[in-house]
């Protein structure tokens, strides 16, 4: 009976080490599944100084545990030309890797995008967009990255 238990323990240890070795060769792969709101209305007489992204939800696409390390945003006109940025903020949020067919989600709340560059560079009745680059770093090595890009629209009300 002891021999069978020892054999089962050795097999379990071998499978666990093999699974861990496979995970260390993967890079983080994160997907943005929800962002609320996806846009903002503002105007020249607006007293709100920043657009608020209330909730952003991320899900890992593989088994690599990682964390959100920073958010970089850049403002773009309708034609695609950049008029402000890049600006950056350091963040920390863990995104657990997928286990089996299930993936836990990670929720980022209350991100503020400053509106001053929009007021200074966008004409009333026009729109712009903000490119949001969420940078994720793997937890094991700390040198493997994944970047999730999302667009946030801003419309400038006519006066």
Image (spheres, rainbow, N blue to C red):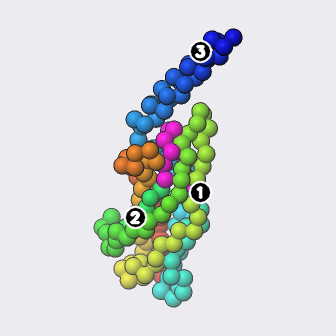
Residue 151 shown left or right of residue 106 in the figure: left
Comparing marks 3 and 1, which lies closer to the viewer?
3
Label drawn at residue 7: 3
Residue 28 shown left or right of residue 12 in the figure: left
Assign a secondary structure to mark 1: strand
Mark 3 Cα-neighbour bin, 10 Å: few <14, some 14–19, many ≥20 = few
Q: Is residue 58 above or below residue 10?
A: below
Label whose residue precedes the other's in the sequence (1 or 2): 2
Residue 95 can be seen in this image: yes
Q: Tell me residue 37's x, y (percent).
A: 57, 64
Mark 1 to mark 2: distance in Å?
18 Å
Front in this rendered view, residue 128 or 55: 55
Residue 119 position by quadrant: bottom left
Comparing marks 3 and 2, which lies closer to the viewer?
3
Label drawn at residue 72: 2
Q: Is 63 a magenta residue?
A: yes
Tell me whether circle 1 and circle 2 mark residues in contact (CB < 8 Å). no
Label whose residue precedes the other's in the sequence (3 or 2): 3
Mark 1 Cα-neighbour bin, 10 Å: few <14, some 14–19, many ≥20 = some
Assign a secondary structure to mark 2: strand
**Residue drawn at (53%, 57%) of the image:** 93
Front in this rendered view, residue 51 or 89: 89
**Residue drawn at (56%, 19%) of the image:** 11
Outermost residue to the bottom: 45
What residue sits right under mark 1 in the picture? 107
Mark 3 to mark 1: distance in Å?
43 Å
Q: Is 75 a magenta residue?
A: no
Q: Is residue 123 above or below residue 87?
A: below
Mark 3 to mark 2: distance in Å?
51 Å
Q: Specify start and end residues of the magenta stretch as a single range.
A: 57-67
Assign a secondary structure to mark 3: helix
């Amino acid at each position: 009976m002891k021999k069978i238990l020892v054999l089962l323990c050795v097999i379990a240890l071998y499978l666990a080490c093999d699974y861990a070795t496979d995970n260390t060769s993967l890079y983080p792969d994160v997907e943005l599944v929800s962002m609320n709101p996806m846009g903002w209305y503002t105007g020249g007489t607006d007293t709100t100084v920043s657009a608020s992204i209330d909730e952003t939800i991320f899900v890992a696409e593989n088994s690599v545990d990682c964390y959100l390390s920073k958010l970089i945003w850049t403002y773009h006109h309708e034609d695609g030309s950049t008029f402000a940025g890049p600006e950056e903020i350091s963040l920390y949020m863990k995104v657990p890797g997928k286990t089996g067919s299930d993936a836990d989600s990670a929720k980022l709340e209350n991100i503020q995008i400053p509106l001053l560059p929009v007021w200074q560079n966008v004409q009333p009745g026009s729109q712009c967009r903000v490119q949001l680059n969420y940078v994720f770093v793997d937890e094991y090595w700390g040198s493997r990255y994944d970047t999730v890009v999302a667009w946030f629209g801003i419309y400038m009300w006519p006066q």
